[in-house]
Image: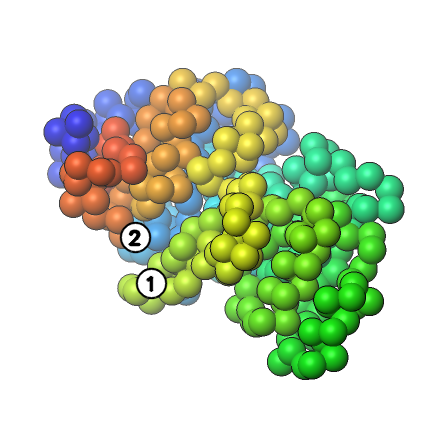
């Protein structure tokens, strides 16, 4: 199966064919609010565009090239710590033009799901959040009430009084109907204990995404999935993931941008999220770049979780087909 993966780096003709496959000339400016059916390039940013605060060489120029060829680019990210506006600021600072409508993050995906699909009933419509400010911003934008997240009251050691209050329910908010778990840089026992007791009382178990790790500074660190694992282990069931590779996220992206899946390509660096997302979503193609988590050996393994259609050493190699 891996033998069919087309290597693009250094092959100008193959790159041109690749670009033409997903080329739709009808798309206009980047910040256009209405998009006719056609091609959409889904880009995971971490590991594809940058690592940490380091933008990969040639990325801004490559994105400009793609747009000049009529590509509609959407930055699809599983990083729940940032809101769409946060990402616009970061992209701009790195020389990449973008607007809020060009970003589709897992925090936004979760907020849309809770507000428009899950529709928690009155009296049970609050969300307990394990996560950072990005989740708070997107829930607030969708009018979803929440507790937890960056509240300093949860950023401390657990006490004997906390154990007692959680056990008898006196420390729990009776209006919480869902627990949403994202990447939390201040994860602790107190936060997890609250999450467990809300779940034991029937709250929905949701996750912005379940990435086990995240690439940063040319190494790997704990991802959002590593924050939700203790709760999943405690309740004996995984959360509903609302980030890649969840098809709930794909449906939301398709609905927002009115894309033609057959003319859409997913570009990413992780097999179990990005590439799997594109394959299970029946997109027209998947491009794996070797600047992030997975390597060629990972999809050549017999038990590979997903195999891309194309791969390149780095995103900027696409300029060779200009």
Mark 1, Cα crowd under 10 Å, few <14 / some 14-19 / many 20+, is few
- Horizontal placement of 240 versus 113: left or right? left
Q: Which residue is mark 2?
A: 293
Marks 2/1 in contact by CB < 8 Å: the verdict is yes
- Horizontal placement of 179 versus 290: left or right? right
Mark 2 to mark 1: distance in Å?
Answer: 8 Å
- Which residue is more in the foreground, 251 or 89? 251
Residue 29: x and y, percent? 53, 33
- Which residue is more in the foreground, 63 or 295? 295
- Horizontal placement of 41 versus 57: left or right? right
Which residue sits at x=34%, y=36%? 275
Residue 27: x and y, percent? 50, 24
Which residue sits at x=31%, y=20%? 21
Residue 235 appears in the figure: yes
* Residue 170 sits in quarter: bottom right
Mark 2, Cα crowd under 10 Å, few <14 / some 14-19 / many 20+, is many
Picture colour scheme = rainbow
- Which residue is more in the foreground, 129 or 34? 129
Q: Give the mark nearer the N terminus: 2 vs 1.
A: 1
Q: Which residue is mark 1?
A: 220
Residue 240: x and y, percent? 56, 41
Secondary structure of the residue carrying numbered label 1:
strand
* Residue 168 sits in quarter: bottom right
Q: Which part of the image, by quadrant, shows the C terminus?
A: top left
Secondary structure of the residue carrying numbered label 2:
loop
- Which residue is more in the foreground, 252 or 208? 208
Residue 238: x and y, percent? 52, 46
């Amino acid at each position: 199966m891996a033998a069919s993966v087309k290597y693009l780096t250094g092959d100008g003709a193959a790159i041109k064919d690749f670009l033409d496959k997903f080329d739709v000339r009808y798309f206009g400016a980047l910040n256009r609010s209405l998009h006719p059916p056609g091609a959409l390039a889904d880009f995971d940013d971490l590991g594809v565009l940058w690592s940490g605060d380091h933008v990969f060489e040639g990325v801004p120029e490559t994105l400009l090239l793609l747009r000049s060829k009529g590509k509609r680019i959407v930055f699809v990210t599983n990083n729940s710590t940032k809101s769409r506006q946060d990402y616009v600021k970061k992209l701009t600072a790195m020389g990449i033009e973008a607007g809020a409508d060009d970003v589709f993050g897992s925090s936004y995906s979760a907020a849309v799901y809770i507000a428009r699909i899950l529709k928690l009933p009155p009296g049970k419509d609050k969300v307990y959040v394990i996560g950072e400010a990005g989740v708070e911003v997107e829930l607030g934008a969708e009018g979803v009430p929440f507790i937890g997240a960056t509240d300093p009251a949860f950023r401390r050691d657990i006490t004997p009084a906390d154990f007692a209050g959680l056990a008898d329910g006196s420390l729990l908010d009776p209006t919480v109907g869902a627990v949403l778990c994202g990447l939390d840089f201040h994860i602790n026992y107190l936060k997890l204990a609250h999450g467990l007791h809300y779940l034991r009382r029937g709250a929905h178990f949701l996750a912005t995404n379940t990435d086990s790790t995240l690439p940063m500074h040319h190494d790997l660190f704990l991802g959002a999935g590593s924050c939700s694992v203790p709760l999943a282990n405690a309740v004996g069931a995984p959360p509903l993931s609302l980030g890649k590779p969840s098809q709930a996220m794909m449906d939301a992206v398709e609905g927002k941008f009115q894309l033609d899946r057959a003319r859409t390509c997913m570009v990413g660096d992780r097999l179990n999220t990005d590439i799997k997302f594109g394959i299970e979503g029946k997109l027209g193609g998947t491009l794996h770049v070797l600047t992030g988590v997975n390597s060629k050996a990972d999809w050549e393994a017999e038990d590979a979780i997903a195999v891309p259609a194309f791969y390149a050493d780095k995103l900027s190699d696409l300029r060779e087909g200009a």
